[in-house]
Every structure is written in C-alpha cells, then in structure tokens.
Amino acid sequence: ARGPALQAALAAGRDGLAKGDSRAARGAFERALAIEPGQKEATAGLARAKNLDQVLALVDEGSNLEKAGQLAGATAKYRAALALDAET
C-alpha cells in the first residue's frame, strides 16, 4: 500500500536529517517522491538533505570560532548555515 510506504520513507528521511546523515535522508526522501511525486514534505526534506553536509560544516566552523572568542566570524558562519537551511 502506498500510504504506509510513503510514511515509512518520510520517517526515514526525518531520521536521517536528525542524525546528520545526508545520504540516508536523501535516499529516503527520493523514495517518498517516487511513491508520491511532488509530495511537499519529501520535496522540502530532499532540499535540506542536499545542503545538510555543508550546513553542518558551517555550524561546526561557527562553533569552533565561537569557542575561540571570534564572535564576528562565528556569527558569519551561523548566518551562512541559516541561509542554506533555516531549520538548522
């Protein structure tokens, strides 16, 4: 049945995002879109998954700069991450 398979794929995509696993998230959201093309959550999730590695790297860089007392640099990294993914 389409409904349970779609829900499972969406849940796997959300889980991948939460764990920082862009590959798993991307695959799951692509499965969801194969089941229901244009599905809103899957479309948004896939976009987030495609940017996830870059977003996480920017957040890490920002955190390191913040710990080093370089607040302006940290702010710039955090803003760059938010520009790519406001849900970060």
Image (cartoon, rainbow, N blue to C red):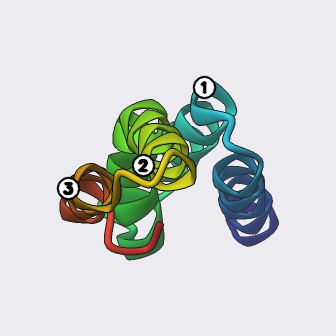
Residues 18 and 54: in front is 54
User: Which residue is the site of mark 1?
Assistant: 23
Which circle marks residue 76 in the picture? 3
Question: Which label lies toward us, 1 or 3?
Answer: 3
Q: Amino acid at mark 3?
A: Ala
Disc with the residue nearer the chain's start (1 vs 3)? 1
Q: Residue 63 at what x, y percent from top left?
A: 53, 50
> In front of the other: label 2 or label 1?
2
The residue indicated by pointer 2 is 62
Question: Can residue 50 be seen at all in this image of the molecule?
Answer: yes
At 32% from the left and 50% from the top, the residue drawn is 47
* Image position, residue 18 (x, y; %): 72, 58
How far across and how far down the image is residue 77, in percent? 28, 50
Do callouts 2 and 1 mark residues in contact (Cβ within 8 Å)? no
Give the SS element for disc 1: helix
Amino acid tagged 1? Arg
Mark 3 Cα shell of 10 Å, populated few (<14), some (14-19), many (≥20): some
Q: Mark 2 or 1 closer to N-term?
A: 1
- 33 vs 31: above or below: below
